[in-house]
Amino acid sequence: MKSGISQKKPNREHNHFLRYYFPVFLVAILILTIMSINVLLRQIREDVQVVPDLYAKNLGAPINRDVDQYLGQYVREQILPHTNFPMIFTDSTKTPASWENLNVEQKLFEQLTAAEQRYLHKMVRRMENQKTVIPLRGSITNNAIVGYVFYDESSTMKNLRRIPYIEGTFILLFAALAIYIITVIRRQEKSLIWVGMAKETAHQFGTPLSSLSGWLMMMQEYAKVGDTEAIAKTITDMDADVKRLQLAANRFGKVGSNIKLKVSHLDALISPTVEYIRRRLPQRSNAVQLVVEHANPHVEVKVDPDLFSWALENVIKNSMDALKNNAGLITIKTFQRKKNIHIQISDTGCGMAKSKFRDIFEPGITSKERGWGLGLSLARRIIEDYHQGKIRVLESELNKGTTIEIILPGV
């Protein structure tokens, strides 16, 4: 295969997007998640620090001072200003007495507007429903409730709750983008396949039809001079071209339909294809060597002969296009390993980089100035979709050559 692989349509960027950018995006999301969680954990640690700080103050309170007054002053001056979540202190009837971190001015409850009073009562009910309330009791001996402390979630907890939704939104948006790009790729592939099939149809039918036109002209000339021997030979050649037209019609007729596989000898499948290619290129037959090496030519394989020969023909043609100066060696080796039949097509052409191994089977990828890059894509569909086999680039080295391997299930 040639190393100078080009593309007829711009679907390669989309393939790179799915292959490279999507995993990078997922890694970026993971990193951002870890960083966000670390930030939130640090904030939670600062929030929790309030409790041990208060405990430490309690243990370190001066002996000659009123502990309740001392700790109350510490709460008002050190703790409340640093809290970032709403709190409401009420009496035993749940009437607000003071509050923190709410958009309500600090003054007597009776002096508030009706709207502000309703707002504070609403917040009290909501916090009570959330069960975020601490009852205040008179003393150890007196169990009567003298008031309540209602509190809401801190901004840290709220941010922590938002993370899954934010990440889920990003992932859904990115998934939607990926689905859109895949849809675009599929449409482009279908377009390439249809255009390529039309070109291939014209080529498959055009060559035999051109030959038939030539044979007819020659027969007219032979008929004028009464050369029956030449006419008979021309009829034989015309028959070969008619059979080629029938083969092309059978191939295209089977694309997209249900086919029945039948058991055939491997050599009986490969030899006609190789001979056809040899006859097609007489101008360079001396410079190009086609060698077939069977470990067992009589090994049986279950295939559709018309479609399989088409796939093999496309692979060999691509190998020939890869040869430098239209000269080199193409070797076709077959052998059986366990239950599978292996067919290796090797050339001494330009080779390719490992990063191109998968790309060459995509529609629109071609190394030729002319053509639609359908050959290997069609071969892959025939081998994998119709014969449940595999086709791959086994190995390749720049300026040394390439080996493509076809693996078919044995009988």
Image: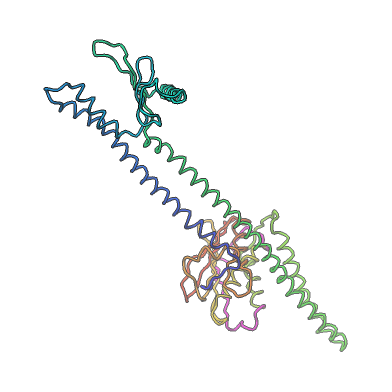
Say which of 172 and 39 sits in front.
39
Q: Is residue 331 visible?
A: yes
Residue 27 in magenta? Answer: no
Q: Is residue 216 above or below residue 352?
A: below
The image quarter in which residue 121 lies: top left
Q: x, y percentage for residue 361?
A: 56, 63
Can see residue 295? no
Q: How many marks?
A: 0
Q: Please provide the residue range marked out in magenta.
A: 280-306
- Across and down, in percent, residue 363 comes to 60, 63
**Residue at the location (70% across, 55% down)?**
257
Residue 278, position as x, y percentages in the image: 64, 77
Most foreground residue, 304 or 101 = 101
**Above/below status of 92 relative to 16:** above
Question: As drawn, is 157 to the left or to the right of 21?
Answer: left
- Residue farthest to the left, as pictured: 64
Observer-nearest of 223 and 328: 328
> Is residue 293 in the magenta section?
yes
Question: In the rendered image, which quarter contains the C terminus?
Answer: bottom right
Image quarter where the N terminus lies is: bottom right
User: From this viewpoint, which residue is outermost toward the front?
Assistant: 111
Q: Nearer the viewer, residue 251 or 366?
A: 366
Place residue 182 in its image quadrant. Answer: bottom right
- Is 144 located above or below residue 256 in the figure? above
